Amino acid sequence: MNPPKFEKTEDMSNLTFLNDASVLHNLRARYGQMLIYTYSGLFCVVINPYKRLPIYEPSVAEMYMGKRRTEMPPHLFAVSDEAYRNMLIDHENQSMLITGESGAGKTENTKKVIAYFATVGASQQKGDAAAAATPDQPDKKKVTLEDQIVQTNPVLEAFGNAKTVRNNNSSRFGKFIRIHFSKLGRVASCDIEHC
């Protein structure tokens, strides 16, 4: 048993006794408080709550932008922001692997990562040309590249997802997604391969 100071610890690599029972106890205690994200060293363990939580709002994303992982509670946005910052600072490609059993929330978490990168790497600043009306259609807003990337998910899901016993929106294929950024950290393009 771990000392009480490790109860609901945010990073399980800090546990004095790191074993299956301790990990399960910590994850269960955190999940009971709807703390679905927990670090385990470099990894982020996620437990699917099977319900919508208000932890993906733009205001939450903004709280994680530019922060170190240790400055904020565990979250997919913290892992995403760390990869984004490392890409900008080290000028090296970054990878994220989202894996788990059927119904674990891989598709939903992938969508959250893409939306976060679209937000943090927006090619237009707020109130800039993205929101400006076009001359030929003054009432119509310009669709940004980031919006287009986020909007590809429903199309892909329509062709490759199915309802299963464990999951109403189960992906029946793997996706390899590359988001390309400019040297300034703005989204430049994206390509998606299915496996």
Image: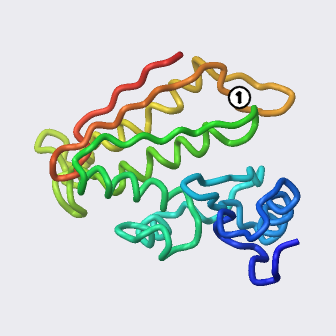
- Colouring used for the render: rainbow
Looking at the rendered structure, the secondary structure element under dot 1 is strand
Decide: is 123 above or below 95: below
Residue 177 in picture, x, y percent from top left = 43, 30
Question: Which quarter of the figure has residue 31?
Answer: bottom right
Furthest residue toward bottom: 5
Tell me the residue that label 1 is attached to.
170
Q: Is residue 54 left or right of residue 95?
A: right
Which of the pair 59/78 is nearer the observer? 78
Q: Is residue 173 left or right of residue 7?
A: left
* Amino acid type for the residue under numbered disc 1: Ser
Which of the pair 72/124 is nearer the observer? 72
Q: Is residue 54 left or right of residue 117?
A: right
Question: Which quarter of the figure has residue 143?
Answer: top left
Residue 4 in picture, x, y percent from top left = 82, 83
Furthest residue toward front: 16
The N terminus lies in quadrant: bottom right
Which of the pair 82/32 is nearer the observer? 82
Q: Residue at x 21, y 60 (%)?
A: 125
- Total count of labels: 1
Q: Residue at x 44, y 44 (%)?
A: 114
Decide: is 138 above or below 15: above
Q: Residue at x 71, y 28 (%)?
A: 170
Question: Which quarter of the figure has residue 3?
Answer: bottom right
Q: Residue at x 31, y 40 (%)?
A: 93
Residue 124 in picture, x, y percent from top left = 20, 54
